[in-house]
Amino acid sequence: MSHPLLSLVTRLLDCGSAGPAKPVVDQLVKNLCEITGVELHPALFLDEGASITANGKAVSPTTAAQCAEDVERTRIFMQGVYTALQQKIAVSTVEPVRVLYAGTGPFALLLVPLLPLFSGQPVRITLLDIHAESLEFLQRLLVALQLDNSELIEGIVCADACNWQAPHNYDLIISETM
C-alpha cells in the first residue's frame, strides 16, 4: 500500500514519546479529516450529535474524532493495539484472529490506520458504532485505504455496544466505550 497514512502510522509506531509523536499525530489527524470529510472544529459546536442511551451518553462523531488530537492517547493506544494484534496472531492456534472494535467513531483510529500492515494476515475485524454518521465517515476511510472490500473487514455494525449480541467470540476487543 502506498497511501500517505501508512508512512505516518509506521513513524508513529516508532515514536517513544509525545515530542516526536506530535507532528506525526497532527498530520495523521489532518489527513483523516481530509479523507473522511470530518470537520474537527466547526465554528459553532454544540455536540448535538451525541446520543443518550439507557447506559449513558454516546459522544458525537465530532467529539469522538477530537480524541485523535490527544497525542499521547493516540500514540500509546495505537502502539498497544498494534502489539496486541501481533501477539494474538503469533500465538493463535485458531484462524482467523477475530477483533471487535466497539465505539469506532469516524476514524476507528486505534486500528483501521494499522490494518494495511496486516494485509494477508489471518485477521477479521468487526467495526461497531452507535452512530450511522460515524460509520459513513469510516466507510470513506476504508475506501481510501482500499480496505472496503478487504477480507480483513468481517463486518460493520451500527448498534449500541451495550445491547449488541455478538455472533461469535472475539480474540481481541478494542472498546472506546465507557
Image (cartoon, rainbow, N blue to C red):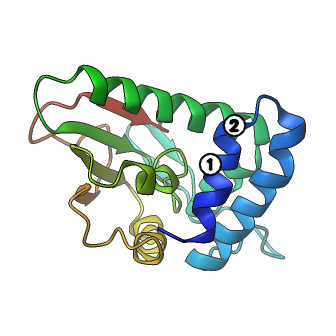
- Identity, as a three-letter code, of the amino acid under mark 1: Thr
**Residue at the spot of label 1:** 10
User: Along the horizontal axis of the image, is 65 left or right of 99?
Assistant: right
**Residue at the spot of label 2:** 14
Query: What SS does tag 1 mark?
Result: helix
Q: How many angstroms separate mark 2 from mark 1 (CA)?
A: 7 Å
Location of residue 157 with respect to 72 vertically, above or below: below
Residue 101 lies, in percent from the top left, at 37, 43
Location of residue 145 with respect to 127 vertically, above or below: below
Callout 2–callout 1 Cβ contact below 8 Å? yes
Residue 170 lies, in percent from the top left, at 21, 32
- Identity, as a three-letter code, of the amino acid under mark 2: Asp
**Residue density around tag 1, few if under 14, some if 14–19, many if 20 or more, within 10 Å:** some
User: Along the horizontal axis of the image, is 9 left or right of 127?
Assistant: right
**Residue density around tag 2, few if under 14, some if 14–19, many if 20 or more, within 10 Å:** few
User: Along the horizontal axis of the image, is 9 left or right of 105?
Assistant: right
